[in-house]
Amino acid sequence: MTSPNASDGDSVGTAERPASTGRMVSMVFGIAGVTVFLICWMTSFSHLEQLLLGWLYFPIRTIPRMTIDPPAVCAGLICLTLLAVTLYFGGLRVLRRNRSVNAQTHVWTLGNALTSVVLFLALFASGISFVGICHQVVWMWSGRNDQAEDVAASEMGIIGILTEQTDQMQAKFQLQSLSLAIQNYHDSHDELPPGGTMTEHGELLHGWLMLIGPYDTYIAPQLDEWISWRKPPNAEVYQCQSDRFLNPSMSGEVFDKDGFGLTHWAANCHVMPIRVVESKTVFSAKPVHKERGVTFDDISDGLKNTILLGTASQNLRPWGHPANVRDPALGINRSPDGFGGPPGWNGAMFAMCDGSVQLLSESTDPKVLKALGTPAGND
């Protein structure tokens, strides 16, 4: 009579042990989580934000800069397919061997193999995440992250980072739109627009942003192309501002001391140089350039390897300035007269002659930028 009771008691005790162990583990993790939360709350709210949301900063900044490499994607898919096939046939072989020992019927399907692959990827990702958490905790504890780029971004908060990423995407879109307008100009004139125009006597007339206006979204019917951009009636045209001429990621003044609207875009002086126009005659209603402009056929280094436009951050010129061109060989954020971008970019954004847009690091060698700036340097 006592034996069954004892057996029942043992079974109950055995069933309670896993439950009690699970409660203990949950309690330990709960206490640890609350302790870390309170420590971060009492020391600094930024530490709490780092702990809870720090993992978001990396993908938010990195994913927009990522590009798809088709060969790498194909290689990854092939490897995953081989892994699934290996697991499927390997599982079938193991089950066939065990059937002679165990009479119970086992079923191993392709779905089981695919599930195993997904679990493998999840374990791989969780391992990377655990390493990242350990690094984050160590950096927070040692204070290293106060000097890191990640923390400089994280101090902006999630809303700030998302806003910056949106502005950066808008800047990319605007550069693409301007490069498309330049391509349309090329299709109409069989040459790229000049970076600016000037008379035979050296008087500066108009810049490239005004010349491509009819191929973009703005025109100025009252503009006199034979008169300098700073003189009436042209001055009134250029003493205005538009979002088309500004980088949304840049802050600061958008007009110069004379009231002319500034721009954050500049052309590559090697592809769109300043050109001289013929003297005004009764036979020429529009200025005629004395020199032939650069064409896409002249760019032997490749359209995707040649800079067309870029962002500027210092010594900004008015958008109508006939000398709004820069030399990529000056480096990025290295010269006031070179190309550059806002501090958060750590580089500058460039539209290439094929219409693509790239964000190049400020650590890029000026020799490389010089090669990207020349249209036919065979480099």
Image (cartoon, rainbow, N blue to C red):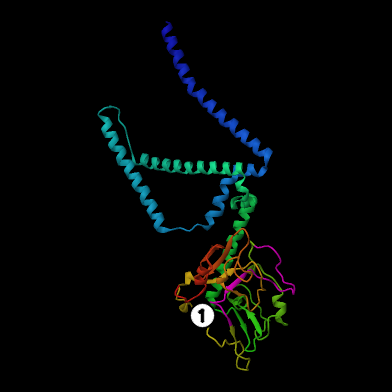
Q: As rendered, which of 364 and 250 lies closer to the eye? A: 364
Q: As rendered, which of 289 and 7 lies closer to the eye? A: 289
Q: Which residue is mark 1?
A: 294
User: Farthest residue in the top direction?
Assistant: 1
For the N terminus, give its image quadrant: top left
In screen coordinates, is 52 left or right of 12? right
Q: Residue at x 65, y 74 (%)?
A: 319
Q: Secondary structure at mark 1?
A: loop
**Quarter of image, res 315:** bottom right
In screen coordinates, is 350 left or right of 377? right
What's drawn in magenta, residue-wise? 250-274
Q: Is residue 257 magenta?
A: yes
Give the vertical position of 168 relative to 181 (above or below).
above
Q: Residue at x 67, y 81 (%)?
A: 223
In screen coordinates, is 309 left or right of 305? right
Residue 91 seen by the camera: yes
Amino acid type, callout 1: Val
Give the vertical position of 141 relative to 9 (above or below).
below
Picture coordinates of residue 137, whole percent (x, y): 57, 41
User: Farthest residue in the bottom direction?
Assistant: 282
Q: Is residue 373 magenta?
A: no
Q: Residue at x 46, y 78 (%)?
A: 297
Picture coordinates of residue 139, whole percent (x, y): 58, 44
Picture coordinates of residue 264, whole percent (x, y): 63, 68
